[in-house]
Amino acid sequence: MGTHLILVTLLSLCSLSFSQECIQEVLEDVDLSGTNITAYMSSDVKECQRLCNLLKSCLFFTFIRPDWTGEKGHFNCYLKSTPSGQPEVQTPLPGVTSGFALKTCNLNAECIQELLENVDLPGTDIKVLYSPDVKHCQQLCTQHPSCRFFTFIRPDWTKDNRHFHCYLKSTDSGQPNVKTPLPGVTSGFSLKTCEPHKRDCYPQVYQDLDFLGADYRSLFTADYQECQRICTHDPGCQFFTFVNEVFTPQEIRYKCHLKFSWRLPRIPIIEKNFSFVSGFSQKAEITQYFDTACPGKLLSDTDIVGSNMEMLLAISPEQCQTFCSAHPLCTYFSYSSDDFKCYLKNNPNKMVTRSMEGVTSGMPERFCQQDNSWVKDVYERIDFRGSEIGYELMVDEDMCQKKCTKDPNCQFYTYIPDLISPHWRRCTLKRVITMPAPPKVTKLPNVVSGFSLKDCVQIHI
């Protein structure tokens, strides 16, 4: 099978061209000869192929099965390449399975913006969210790290009440296995490979749709346009629902409901791991700029009792404070360094504290310049697990951070520098959904819903 090549060779392989042919079948008891880029431990051949798909320079692979009769090497996954893009030779070899990267099978390798009306794309449903329209659903798929295509349930769907459901989907090949006619749905593909956009603008308003939940403030306005203007200027508002002049009951007519959703990246899993180093993109949009510096006050070894509103994971008390500052209902927070749990709390009337080792508490910082140095820090022995959008082999952590910063889709990363690890020098780029997303969308007569226009740079408010 060969051994690891020197690092210079590893990095030079990143520029090799790929074979244009889509070959999905795997070859039992066949070794594909080529240059071994690296070798990882893998649970099965599908996992080995997935690793090859994620590594840009990998074109084909060989996996050592459990029935391999050699003394060692079981479950090794050898990721390979050649200058021609094809194996040098195919050699019979019992106990191994080989195959090709599915990059060229992936329809998302090209930018496909076309939508398929009344067509379902069956695949593995990886997440179900709510969207007011198909374009919003497509952007959710684009931002989700694993989504390759989607199906949106339109308002004219008649089989059940799943209107406005947005099904994010994927397959091993990255493309749907079949296309099935199905009235009342619209399907399409992720736009990950299309020209990157800074942020998406959603100027459309939706008559007779309620963005249910996520309310943090309500007030009365003359019309939905004024409600949208207030939402746009309020830092915490991402979308709204306005009750019009003919709504029943009469006493809540003209009511404007301002609603919140997270625009900051929230890491789904943070784990301690001796072999890992993690960090953030240096282009991460964390807070807006102010001339006045925030005081940065934190209460060490102090817990604020009760009033828990939401729990997130954070890498530091400072990131937890950033979360609290971004949420309009957060009045204070407590952070546990042992398990990375950040408890956002809401009680505007009182704050009860107690001494507790390993817990840091504080208040939000708003309308001042926060200290975002936690974004620049590198976190050793920490794994930001999951949410992978791809990986490459890098010389060191600094190159990994620069790669994440340069990639417009990367929000955070994990790097493995330890030579003991089977995944050494692997720089994994990651992201999560940060676009405005209502927790539920339902039909409701005589209301109007829509989004903040903060990201609509050409719209004058």
Image (cartoon, rainbow, N blue to C red):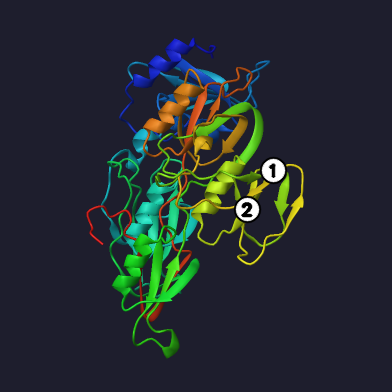
458 left or right of 82 in image? left
User: Which quadrant would residue 122 be assigned to in this image?
Assistant: bottom left
Q: Which residue is mark 2?
A: 333
Q: Earlier in the sequence, mark 1 or mark 2?
A: 1
Residue 265, position as x, y percentages in the image: 48, 46
Q: Is residue 47 above or below residue 214?
A: above
Closer to the camera in the image, 279 or 332: 332
Q: Count neighbours of disc 1 (C-alpha within 10 A) and say few if under 14, some if 14 to 19, many if 20 or more.
A: some
Q: Quadrant of the N terminus?
A: top right
Residue at 56% x, 58% y is 330
Total marks in image: 2
Q: Which residue is mark 1?
A: 300
Closer to the camera in the image, 5 or 122: 5
Disc 1 and disc 2 in contact, CB within 8 angstroms: no
In space, the residues marked 1 and 2 are separated at their CA atoms by 12 Å
| Amino acid marked by disc 2 | Phe
Residue at 60% x, 65% y is 348
- For the question of whether residue 346 can be seen, the reply is yes
Residue 323, position as x, y percentages in the image: 54, 50
- For the question of whether residue 393 can be seen, the reply is no
Residue 435, position as x, y percentages in the image: 40, 53
The secondary structure type at the circle numbered 1 is: loop
Residue 363, position as x, y percentages in the image: 59, 52
From the viewer's perspective, is the residue at label 1 or at label 2 nearer?
1
Q: Count neighbours of disc 2 (C-alpha within 10 A) and say few if under 14, some if 14 to 19, many if 20 or more.
A: many
| Amino acid marked by disc 1 | Ser
